[in-house]
Amino acid sequence: MIKEKSKKARFGNEMSLDKIILSYLRTIGISFLIAFLFTLLLSFHARNEMIKNLYTNVKEQQKFDEQLARQLVVQSDFAKDLRQKRYSVCMQVGMLYEAAKDYKNAQYAYEIALDKARPEVYAPYYRLAKVLIAQEKFKEAQDIIKSARDINNKHLVKFKTRSYIEMGDKYYSIGKFLSAAKSYEKSKYYYDKFKNRDEIVEKAIAERIVNSYVQTADIMVKNGSNSDAVRFLAKAEKLAPKDFLIRYKLAIIYSDLDAEKSVKYFERLMEECPQEIDYGVYAKALMKAANIADWQGNNIQAKYYRYKIHSLDLFVNNKVIYKNDVEIYLDSFTVRKMWLKYHLRGMYRIKNVSHTDITNLSAEFVLKRKDNGKILESVNTKVVTKNNPLYSNGGVTEAIMVNLGKNIFTKRELDQYIIEIYLYKDEKYKTLITTMNVPKKSING
């Protein structure tokens, strides 16, 4: 009776025993749910740490394997009497020398293995080509790759695809970009013979070809061969038609070779990302195009190009902020833990180093993960107004305070985050000004 009265006093006279039990069960259920979610969060964190450690362990294992292989090959001459050994032994000896980065002896072992291998076995071809490429013996490597019968055998196609990728990577690493491109094209030729192709592999090969073409074009420009540079960039554009940088390079080079083509490229690029465009180069291309139109007697087209210069000038002044127009200073950064949450506070100032007054400017401070670019938090703030302008050639804003918070459990996790700072006059055209690591302790700028 006493217990029943206490329950009534606590829950009210109208609350039945069933409702009291239900209330208890609901409370217990919520507690279990919170505990489950908390445990799940900890397990995800532990899993991420395990994956990170796994990659670290792989690199450490590779270093350990190399050291062990070096010790073994120093202690014994495994190449001795190798011609009397079986194919499998020759391959193992070759891989041991390869692991020790003794490519000369690895080459010797793989050459013997190749002599002993069955015609349909391509592993010794690949291994031998790989160590020849590592020694920059490209002609010999190509001869080995070509010596395998060129038929539509799946294992052969795989061998040739991988070998030409290896060769392209080596050429690229030593700055022979055109040779790299040719090797990658050969790898693509053989990879295209596969019926079931992997989109990731296809994309990786295409990116290698594009990067090689772009690097080759850059060298051509430095050597004054702009026409050749256009040729290679045009090939890259076919493979990556949406790549901004390729089209931007073409726009700049065409400003000297063909002003009208340059203008066409710039027009499309301005629609996509005007804050990345050098307006000065674009304006010169427009002026050249206008002069050419005048010379051809096309006055209407000439007027259009000149009007375009004026309208773009207004657009840039009102809508676009360039990275080189400003500098950002960090006065202080405070790192303070409150319960399970780190409170991050930065004090910033912005300096105008351009020759034009800025009367409208906002800033966005974005906290992101380094590994996958996931946005964790974003803070937007107005930093310059018409009533409080940022004057040209050295004007500085007052201190801008930015508060960020992220639910994390260890200070070590701060290593995983970065802060990106964007400035913009119009929200559609944000310019990334700088990226900084998140400090693990409070600092003064």
Image: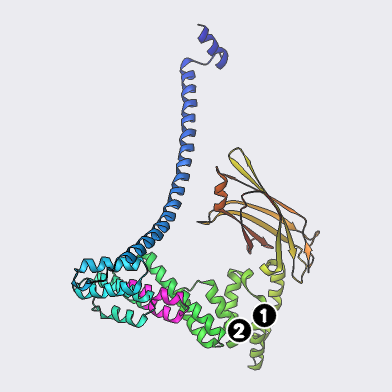
Instruction: State the quadrant of the C terminus.
Output: bottom right
Give neighbour class at mark 1: few <14, some 14-19, many 20+ (Cα, 10 Å): many
Give neighbour class at mark 2: few <14, some 14-19, many 20+ (Cα, 10 Å): many
Depth check: 190 or 140 in front? 140
Task: Name the residue furthest front.
Answer: 75
In the displayed structure, does residue 194 sit left or right of residue 55? left
Give the magenta range. Answer: 161-185
Q: Quadrant of residue 98?
A: bottom left
Mark 2 lies on residue: 255
Residue type at mark 2? Ser
The x, y position of residue 283, in whole percent, is 67, 80
The tally of labels here is 2
Q: Quadrant of residue 125?
A: bottom left
Depth check: 191 or 219 in front? 219
Mark 1 lies on residue: 283
Is 170 within the magenta?
yes
**What secondary structure predominates along the stretch shown in magenta?**
helix
Q: Residue at the location (28% across, 75% down)?
A: 108
The x, y position of residue 397, in whole percent, is 77, 59
Res 160 seen here? no
Task: Name the residue furthest top.
Answer: 1
- Judge whether 257 appears above or below 65 on screen: below
Q: Quadrant of residue 103?
A: bottom left
| Coloring scheme used | rainbow
Q: Earlier in the sequence, mark 2 or mark 1?
A: 2
Residue 292 image label: none
Element type at mark 1: helix
